[in-house]
Amino acid sequence: MTSPATDQRDSGPGSGRRAHGRREAAGLSLSLQNLHRAFGATKALDGLSLDIQPGEFVALLGPSGCGKTTALRIVAGFEVADAGSVLVDGKDVSPIPAAKRDMGMVFQSYSLFPNMSAIDNVGFGLRMRKAKPAERSRRAAELLEMVGLTDQARQYPHQLSGGQQQRVALARALAIEPQVLLLDEPLSALDAKVRLQLREQIRALQQRLGITTLFVTHDQEEALSMADRVGVMREGRFEQVDVPDQLYAHPKTAFVAEFVGTMNRLPGALTSGGNVSVLDEVLPVQAGAADGLSGDVDVLVRPEGLRIEARPGGNGIVTDRAFLGSVSRIGVQLSGDVAVKVDHPSVHAGAFAPGASVQVSMPADEAVLVAARQ
Amino acid sequence: MAAITDAELGAIAPAPDRPASRRTRRYPVWRWVILSLAGLYFLIPLYAALKFAGLKAFPDVLKQSGFTSAFGLSVRLAVITTVLTLVLMVPTTVYVHLRLPRLRRVLEVVTILPIVIPPVVLIIGVLQIAPAALKGSPNLLGLEYVILAMPFAYRSIDAGLRAMDLKTLFEASNSLGANWLTTLWRVVVPNLRTALLSAIVLTVALVLGEYTMASLDLYQTFPVWIVLFSQDSGPVATAASLLSLFVTWIFLMAIVTLAGRGARRRGGGEVALFTVGRQGTGDSR
């Protein structure tokens, strides 16, 4: 599976933009090579490698402490890797100090300079690059317009809302025409509605400018909805780097499966020939998933991967039902004290009121993922 | 003053479960009693001094021999001390906050030493070891005052730095291409304005009032002159010290007012001598 970003480079908006001869540099490739970083006894990064295509938007996703922020900070030049290197456009940037790396960065906490107005904040990087005042204010105004804050140009950070501040921070990072855009959980301090708007705005802007972007988040929804590819990290390594739909539909490990989206665990038993018996079915196991396992295992299946039908004397009892829009998520207590969630079209979910007897089954059409019994 | 009154009132105010009407009725009475007591405590000596000196003595002060040079020396020392203190303490405190946060405790202890050790001890030690070239110059006194001012300057700057997300500001500025010094000058110092002003106010007040060191060091600074002159003419010397009080006070008020205006415009907090209110970074809506 090639990444969508790779496809876009050939025919998408990126090439059109370059044809117009805009000054924004075309995206550059970014490569993390075998990065190691330890803080005392803790290994923050344990041989992390990743190749990002020019113009690609990659999210690093993982629980706190998985090393994703350390990776970003090494790319930015705020941390030094114990081993490994960072290449931008094929050139090793490790010896270059942060101030000379041309990385645009947006931080999690509000990082605008409180003593400067929005437009002065945006122009700061240009000022450091000795741009002429006229050029500086023209460019800063242009960027503020791009993030929709022309009217707020003269306001100071304390007069702006959180979402506005992050948009100014984004404009400020983009003003220096950075080689790579680094986003360190820029949305996590914002409230839900603003977060959604800004998510779309960042993505649209990134695609329009074709700038290579590395985005760190612990919010899987954010990662899946914004990024071309998502790297799921755990203990300083990648568990899986893939496009969002593959990550969701075909997680390679139990960790990825459970970290991304909702996952049910059903008791099953491995049988000969790489199969597993679960819910009275015998299903093939995804290649490699059963390595090192035998006997009793947990079968991992998504709520939409289970089928439910009303049946007196079935294998489960409905415990609750949540309306999620087009689908409803139905909680079912199966025999053997196993609770599962099943997604079912809301229009047909009327029959599954709490207390109803139901039959939950698994369609036998795909290989399943298994993990050690918990 | 307001802080003291509030604290006192808090202690005296009735428990919250009492009816609100009683509370509002009792509040103003106590407020005025305490304000008046505190006011009298401060104003009576001033009034007594004014009465003793007489208004006629004030114009005489300026004509007294030695006044101009003594006052000039004190102002010069205030400038030297303030500049040196800020140049030394701002980068040091920022560096400790940023890179050596564990040293903050140590620094706090170190900076309190000049208060704990009596000035007499300090100056005698200094006079023993100071190089001859410095001993003959009032600049030595300036260097000593830097030590005396350190506790106040450190505390003001420390409070100011605590109110901002220093690490993020530095990293943001760094990623935009600014080096350490540029960041210090263009980002940190402007946001420390309030804290720096309070450091300046405290330093200037300290230098204009210091007697022990100057006198043992045999320099005729303004306080030393007042003491010497009071032996000649009590009323004029008293007028001089009142004058110095008013001059210092007007100077401090001017600084605080100016700082307050700037802070309001940019969303900084209240300007007070020892505390620095919230600054822009911590303020999110």
Image (cartoon, grey):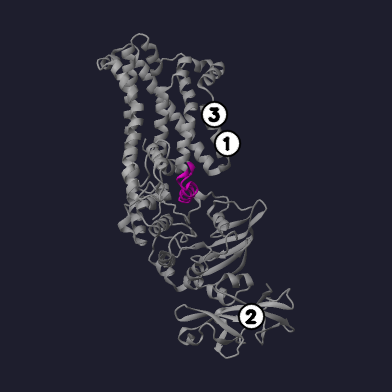
Q: Is residue A241 above or below residue B212?
A: below
How far across and how far down the image is residue A309, in percent?
55, 89
Q: Is residue A43 above or below residue A221?
A: above
Specify whether residue B171 is painted magenta: yes
Disc 2: host chain: A
Q: Residue furthest left?
A: B56
Asked if both marks, 2 and 1, belong to the same chain, the answer given is: no
Kindly identify which numbered label has been placed on residue A368: 2
How far across and how far down the image is residue A4, in percent?
50, 73
Q: Residue furthest bottom?
A: A312
Q: Nearer the viewer, residue B11 or B85?
A: B11
Which residue, given by chain and number where applicable, does mark 3 sit on? B113
Disc 1: host chain: B
Give the Cα distance between marks 2 and 3: 70 Å
Dot 3 crowding, Cα within 10 Å, few <14, some 14–19, many 20+: some
Residue type, mark 3 in image: Leu
Segment tinted magenta in the rendering: B162-180
Q: Quadrant of the N terminus of chain A?
A: bottom right
CB-based contact (under 8 Å), mark 2 and mark 3: no
Give the Cα distance between marks 2 and 1: 59 Å
Residue at the image point whose x is 59% and y is 59% from the top: A65
Residue at the image point whose x is 71% and y is 81% from the top: A269
Which residue, given by chain and number where applicable, does mark 1 sit on? B106
